[in-house]
Amino acid sequence: MEKIILLFAFLIFLYFHRILIMICLSPITIWASKQQDVLGTKHKSFKIRLANKYCWWFERLFIYWCSNIHSHRIRLFFYKKIYRINLEKDVVIYSGAEIRNPNGLHIGKGSIIGSNAILDARAGIDIGKNVNFSSNVSIWTLQHDYRDPDFACNPKHYGPVKICDRAWIGPNSIILRNVTIGEGAVVAAGSVVTHDIPPYEVWGGIPARYISKRPQNMRYEFKGTYCHFL
């Protein structure tokens, strides 16, 4: 009986040890996320260099761990309280999300982020209300300049992304820097969006182009319902 109890305790520790590590290091994580120089524009003091190193080594690892916790409530606790993502009421973020610079991410009320999303918020991502992301959606706010001798991310190659209310982003879509997706707009599956999309239009393709109009009488509101353990 004692062996069974010890085995059970070991299995519980094995499953929850990542959560314990993230909780223990949470004060350092919160400090580093506030101090880091995401875009490389600040004076490189020792404090900023230390915060950058910590975030480079651990923040992305911890967010990866967090994204694979089989509890939506625990994930949201870490996202909101530790990583300081600006989440409004009834937001759903499914498992496998990769979030860069969580401080730069805002998600509006009732929005749903599908599984395995990549949200690069280093230059800022603003997601409106009742937005739906299907699985494997990627948003990139920075990109390397292939012409730069140092392969750097120059100011001309980064910019924020804004997704307005009730937009629907189809699976496997990619949205690049300096793009606004208008209210109620639809991005077809597998598209690469490089330009702004006007409200209530359907775009698709590589690069994404206009396909059709969407009715403007949309009134649905997501209530935060989610699939458990995902």
Image (cartoon, rainbow, N blue to C red):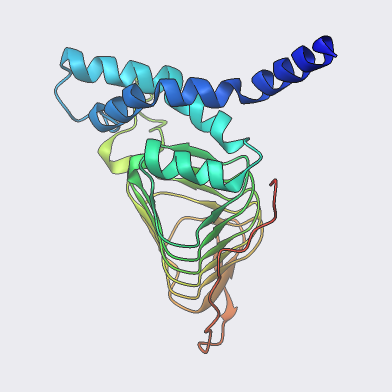
Foreground residue among 206 and 19: 19
Q: Is residue 96 above or below residue 137?
A: above
Q: Is residue 64 above or below residue 81?
A: above
Q: Residue at x 67, y 24 (%)?
A: 15
User: Which residue ends up furthest to the top in the rendered image?
Assistant: 3
Q: Is residue 88 above or below residue 8?
A: below
Q: Residue at x 38, y 41 (%)?
A: 81
Query: Is residue 57 left or right of 13 when viewed as pictured?
Result: left
Q: Position of residue 90 (x, y in %)?
A: 50, 62
Q: Is residue 28 above or below residue 86?
A: above
Q: Residue at x 44, y 77 (%)?
A: 199
Total residue callouts: 0
Query: Is residue 74 left or right of 160 when viewed as pictured?
Result: right
Q: Position of residue 25 (x, y in %)?
A: 40, 21
Q: Position of residue 100 (x, y in %)?
A: 43, 36
Residue 83 showing in the rendered view? no
Split into 4 quadrants, where in the image is the N terminus?
Answer: top right
Foreground residue among 34 and 174: 34
Answer with the quarter of the image where residue 50 lies: top left
Query: Is residue 157 left or right of 15 when viewed as pictured?
Result: left
Foreground residue among 166 and 144: 166
Query: Is residue 55 left or right of 218 when viewed as pictured?
Result: left
Q: Position of residue 206 (x, y in %)?
A: 60, 56
Answer with the quarter of the image where residue 145 lies: top left
User: Which residue ends up furthest to the front in the rendered image?
Assistant: 1
Residue 213 showing in the rendered view? yes
Q: Residue at x 69, y 23 (%)?
A: 12
